[in-house]
Amino acid sequence: MADSRQRIIIKVFRKYGHSLGPESLEYVEEILDQTGLEPNEVENAVDWIAKEYNRQDDAQMKVSRDILHRVYETLSNPPDQEDNPSVLPSLEGHLHIIDAFEMPLWNWSQEKSAFERAAAPLTMSGSADSRVHAMRNRLYIIKQTVLRNDHFSPSTLPSKDRENLLTLRSTKQLLGRAGHRFLLFGMLSHSKEGKLCLEDEDGSVELDFSQLDQPSEGLFTEGCFALVEGEYTEEATFVVIAIGHPPCENRQTARSIFGHVDFLGKGATTLLEDNQMEMQVRTELSGSTFFFLSDVWLDNPRTFDGLRRMFSNCVEEGFIPQIIVMCGNFTSHGIAQGSGTDIRKYQENFDALADLIASFTMITRTTHFVFVPGPLDLTINAALPRRPLLSSLVSRLKTKIPKAHFATNPCRIKFYDQEIVIFREDLMSRMLRNLVGVKPDVQNDDLKRYLVQSLLDQSHLIPLTYSVQPILPDYDHTLRLYPLPTSVVLADRYDRYQMTYEGCHVFNPGSFVANSFGFASYSPARRESEECVVSFGNDDDSETFVDG
């Protein structure tokens, strides 16, 4: 193994006209040992070192150990990201692309008021009780945050305000108490008669909205959980006077309570470790950038023009993103069932994408590519979470792109202390089609804000019933947004937007071709995104990134 690695080191340096003595060779091996690289990554790492050594003014044909040390320090602590676009191999241990099917299931225990890891293996079909357990988990997780909120856990000292506070009740406590006012928490659903009801773990009650002026902010859909205040009547209905989403609990609060729980399956970290990693990202990785593209329609020739321009600009400017996430749909129209012609063309488009990316050597060597399927793409299953793109269709991408990741939908990126959720779904239209209540005269900007607020308040990417959106019940937890992630990418065909709610940055990169080659650039150091466009110059046919 060592002899093989030494041959690689000698070969790479010889390519740049240099030879190594025993001391220099030993030092390069020490660097590789510290970074903990995989065997298939050694040659790329040595190439970066040799290339940087060759740039030194005092570089000699026989490699100097002192100059090598200086080169290594420069690569480890780059003064300017534009002059050094490389991604340090040592960062790889802090970057994880997490598939939904790799995430462990943690159920909420009412008896212990804590999360318990599921012992039974998870299956695609699920068990008879899986759906019930999944919906109860949704309810219990939100409810425990509601009860911890200041508005629902008042001071123990007697006060006038305390006497006027309403206590959270269940539907079974309504019986025999007509004419009294209550505050309930449960899921909005329809009864067999088509009446809108509020359902909790103890039962359900029909809702009467005749006295409601207007709901609070947010999108209220069948399947979402709501706080409802009103009066119980002799007719066994609940006259609603106010309705709202449950309050959202920020990430730091949740992590301070459940920091020991390894929700992602990549090891739990303490708040102190999170703070240390956050500082490291801000100081040492200030130039690190992720690109997010959605609706990369490979059957549209203009898509390849836009991608080629984007890659060319990255190379020319020395601005190489650490991660490029490409979300589907990878076709602008659905593939007809059993159509061999459509499937063959679909595969050929992925092969063409592989050739395009591979033609940019610097990007291919350093950038991680993440491919997330959309609703129209070919995967094993249609229910959420969706499996990755079929291996047989992306074989050339796997061969030519060493750092290609074929992820589920949704998937997550764990980068140091940050958790980034990526979800490709036409979510806005789906939520609007299933509304049961929203404020009147809502404007476009309000809808974007309401969508973000609703998802984060509901702690779930799809706050709908299983009849509206099929979900694999054993994997419902992979769509949870609790604890609140650092960022959420809601790749949608709807208008582009970006906003921060309760410390969580949410953005939609929009359709790549439909938005004139628009995409989103995310900075982990600032935890913010920017809207970017690949623009084509008229004079020199060059392209630039323009903030939206």
Image (cartoon, grey):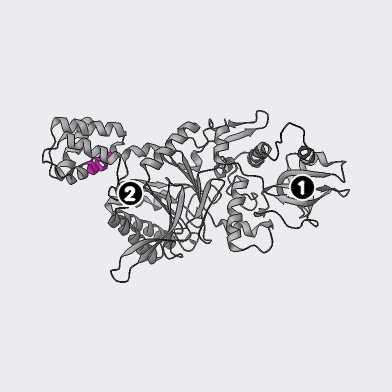
Between residues 172 and 145, which one lies in front from this camera angle? 145
Q: Looking at the image, is 252 positioned above or below residue 297?
A: above
Q: Is residue 269 visible?
A: no
Q: Looking at the image, is 523 positioned above or below residue 304?
A: above
Q: Position of residue 397 (x, y in %)?
A: 35, 51
Q: Quadrant of the C terminus?
A: bottom left
In the rendered structure, which amino acid carries the disc numbered 2?
Answer: Ile
Q: Earlier in the sequence, mark 1 or mark 2?
A: 1
The segment highlighted magenta reads 41-49
Q: Which residue is found at the position 35% from the left and 45% from the top?
A: 403
Looking at the image, which residue sits at the far front? 160
Q: Is residue 214 visible?
A: yes
Looking at the image, which residue sits at the far bottom? 538
Between residues 501 and 396, which one lies in front from this camera angle? 501
Q: Are marks 1 and 2 in contact (CB under 8 Å)?
A: no
Q: Position of residue 389 (x, y in %)?
A: 44, 51
Q: Secondary structure at mark 1?
A: strand
Lateral position of residue 539 relative to residue 408, left or right: left
Secondary structure predominantly adopted by residues drawn in magenta: helix
Q: Which residue was labeled with disc 2?
A: 401
Q: Which residue was labeled with disc 1?
A: 229
Q: Secondary structure at mark 2?
A: loop
Q: Is residue 525 magenta?
A: no
Q: Quadrant of the N terminus?
A: top left
Looking at the image, which residue sits at the far top? 112
